[in-house]
Each structure stands twice: as C-alpha cells, then as structure tokens.
Amino acid sequence: MNHSLRVLIADDEELARRLIREYLRSHPDIVVISECETGTEAVDAIFAHQPDLIFLDIQMPELTGLEVLDATGRKSGIIFTTAYDQYAVKAFDLHAIDYLLKPFSQQRFDEALQKAKKLLQEDKAADSSPIGIQQLITSNVQQSQRLTIRDREKVHVLTFEEIDFIEAQDDYILIHANGRTVMKTQSLSDIEEQLSSTGFVRVHRSYLLQMKALTGIERQSKDTQVAVLRSGIKIPVSRTGYERLKTRLN
C-alpha cells in the first residue's frame, strides 16, 4: 500500500493487545491509532478514528465484536481474534478478511495481515465490501435477539422483546422501544432482512412491527386499518401488511 495503514486493536486482554503490537513492529507501514478493552470503547473509537483495519476480539465486555460491527455499520477491514474456535468455521465460510485463533504465531499473523492489505486494496478499487461480514452480523443478531445501536454518541442495546416497532425516516430508521426512540443509519428493508424469522412483520412500507407489541387491529375506513400497540400508539397497516398479519395471527 502506498500509505500507512491505520489500525485499531480491540481486545479485553492486555497480553493479547501487547502481542499484536509486538507482531506489528516488523510492519513499518502500520500505525496503531487506538486500543480498546471493551466493545463500547471500540464502537466509540471506530466512529472517532475511522481505522483502515481493526483487530477485533469476538468476546469482549459490554458488547461482542459482532455487536460492535452492527453498531458501527462496519463491513470491511476486519481481522477477528479470539480464543473461541466455534466461530472460526463461520468466519471463514462467510469470507471474513481473516481469523486468528489464539494463541497465534508471527507467521500466521503476517499471513492474515497480508491478506487484509490485499482485500482492502481490492475493496477500494471496487468500492465494495464483503457481504460475508453482514451475513455473520445478521446471524449473530438473530441468535442474540438484540440490536446494538449508537445514537447521539451513546450505545444502546435493545432486546427484541423491548421493541414495539421500527419506522423508516429518510435515510435512517427510528426504533421505538419502552417509550424511547433510538435512531440508526440503516434502511427499513435492511433491518427487515436482518430481523427475518424473529417475530417482526412489515405492515407498511414505512413500518416494521414487533408481533408481541400488537394488541389489536382497528378499521378506520373501508380501505384503511391501523395496528394498535401495547403502548397505545397506532401505526398504519397497508393491504399487503394486513395479509401478512393475518398469516401470522392464524
């Protein structure tokens, strides 16, 4: 690469961070711009520094590495590092940049770094990012049954049970949960795909409903209906959305 690669290290173990720094000493084109011990710190650092490459532990306090990616929208420039090998097959199968299973050697580290540099160059040339990362994030969201969102410099973790509905708003979405509203930069179609088979139903082009929040359906006119939620809020239901609701309720 023609310029220094800006790297962030996120791992709750000091020895692990120290080892990565030591291995990086033989790579003069690498600059470590930040180190983080928790998932929340990693989210803040990614937004603040926009690193080229992240060495990201999967199991960290507060947020997992995959939740960090969900909160930041990061899809490329990631090398996973962890002691938990049950994630390894998924990471490789879904074309993550690379995966370092602790303890790893200098040679294995160098191989991962070289691969990362190559893929970063390809991504910049193609203006694209690995879809495998998004698939891995989606799988994790569905398994954990919670969303991780950074809004107004604060990280929110919302369980599916807490969420009443999700609303499209220009280039972002509003997630309504427990009487509060959290904003996330994501399309309603993307979040719908992410939450597929998890109890959410698209009831309108602008609304995604959590079925457990539904208390009833009211007809307002011959062609218009609304969903009544446990919060007392009413949201519009399109004709197609009504058919989807009927399918779920039967």
Image (tube, rainbow, N blue to C red):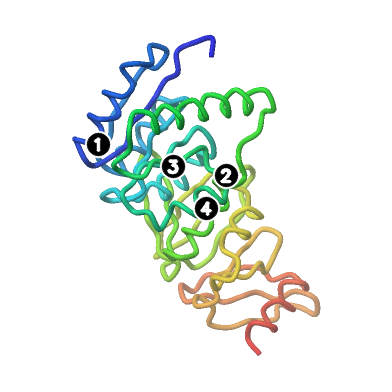
- Nearer to us in this view, 66 or 154: 66
Residue 95: numbered disc: 2
| Residue 198 percent across, percent down from the top left | 54, 70
- Say which residue label 1 marks: 16
Element assignment for label 3: strand
- Nearer to us in this view, 122 or 100: 100
| Residue 27 percent across, percent down from the top left | 38, 16
Distance from disc 4 to disc 3, alpha carbons, whole Å, reads 13 Å
Are dots 1 and 4 in contact, CB under 8 Å?
A: no
Q: Amino acid at mark 4?
A: Leu
Horizontal side of residue 94 vs 41, given as left or right: right
Return the disc, 3 or 1, that comes first in the chain's sequence. Answer: 1
User: Relative to 153, does residue 247 appear above or below in the rendering?
Assistant: below
Return the disc, 2 or 4, that comes first in the chain's sequence. Answer: 2
Which of the 4 image quarters holds residue 68? top left
Residue at left offset 62%, top offset 45%: 131
- Say which residue label 3 marks: 99
Distance from disc 3 to disc 1, alpha carbons, whole Å, reads 14 Å
Q: Amino acid at mark 2?
A: His
Residue at left offset 25%, top offset 30%: 19
Q: Amino acid at mark 1?
A: Ala
Residue 136: numbered disc: 4
Return the disc, 1 or 2, that comes first in the chain's sequence. Answer: 1
- Nearer to us in this view, 12 or 39: 12
